[in-house]
Image (cartoon, helix red, strand yellow):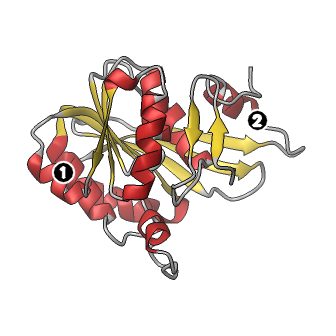
Amino acid sequence: MSNNWFQFKKFRIDQENSALKVGTDGVLLGAWCETSGTQHILDIGTGTGLIALMLAQRSNAMIAAIEIDKETCNDAIQNFRNSSWADRLTLYSDDFNVFQESHAQQYDLIVSNPPFFRKSLRSAEMASSIARHDVSLSFQQIIAGSKKLLNEVGRLAVILPFEVLDDFREMARLEGFYLSRKTVVVPKIGKPPKRVLLEFSCAAAYPEISELVILCGNDQYADKFKEMTKEFYLNFT
């Protein structure tokens, strides 16, 4: 997935200027989020705009997307303009910490594929460092800012490395969130989980727990993964 573009069934992602290219994490979050009943959605750290575009395809909501890196914004705005949902997509070239202080809009759903290599070495390139690490945006800032911007029944959905699950869940609990959905992502059957999809609600909720395997033992994509992503990937029907 290191090409300068990636073609999905109903839109194309141009990513020449983006620090991080299209990857499975973003596709998983964009396909997994519950979009029914949403009127206003916010995508924090949109990158190329992938998740925002997936949610535009899956809903009738007005979608705002935030991206701090100026070069990456060039790709995102082009991808939005070239899509069928340009009238419902708005890009903000801004820092989320600034955005959440200056915007009064309340959202039904906030999504983020956040920077999470918190304990690894910073990369030499700042754009990649910002995209991959919590240089400019910590988990705590995402959680607190989202709590402020969500309406009283709003939801926050993220994809994270499995090993930070407990830390993130505790931060969210202390901020007043309730875990409503958790899907553990296993890269291949028989392997340990690598990612986890989490949804938190501002309203009390009993969590729905599940597991998603991406590859079967024969290195073929699992049926559940194909079913989840078939509206996007060209090779799935």
SS type, badge 1: helix
Residue at 75% across, 29% down: 223
Residue 222 is labelled as: 2
Residue at 52% across, 60% down: 19
Position of residue 13 in the picture relative to residue 225 (left or right): left
Mark 1 vs mark 2, CA separation in Å: 39 Å
Q: Quadrant of residue 8?
A: top right
Which of the two marks, 1 or 2, is nearer to us in this view?
1
Q: Nearer the viewer, residue 167 or 75?
A: 75
Q: Which residue is mark 1?
A: 99
Q: Farthest residue in the right direction?
A: 218
Considering only vertical position in the picture, is 39 above or below 208?
Answer: above
Considering only vertical position in the picture, is 21 above or below 153?
Answer: below
Q: What percent of the width, then of the height, locates residue 231?
A: 62, 22
Residue 217 is labelled as: none
Position of residue 143 in the picture relative to residue 27 (left or right): left
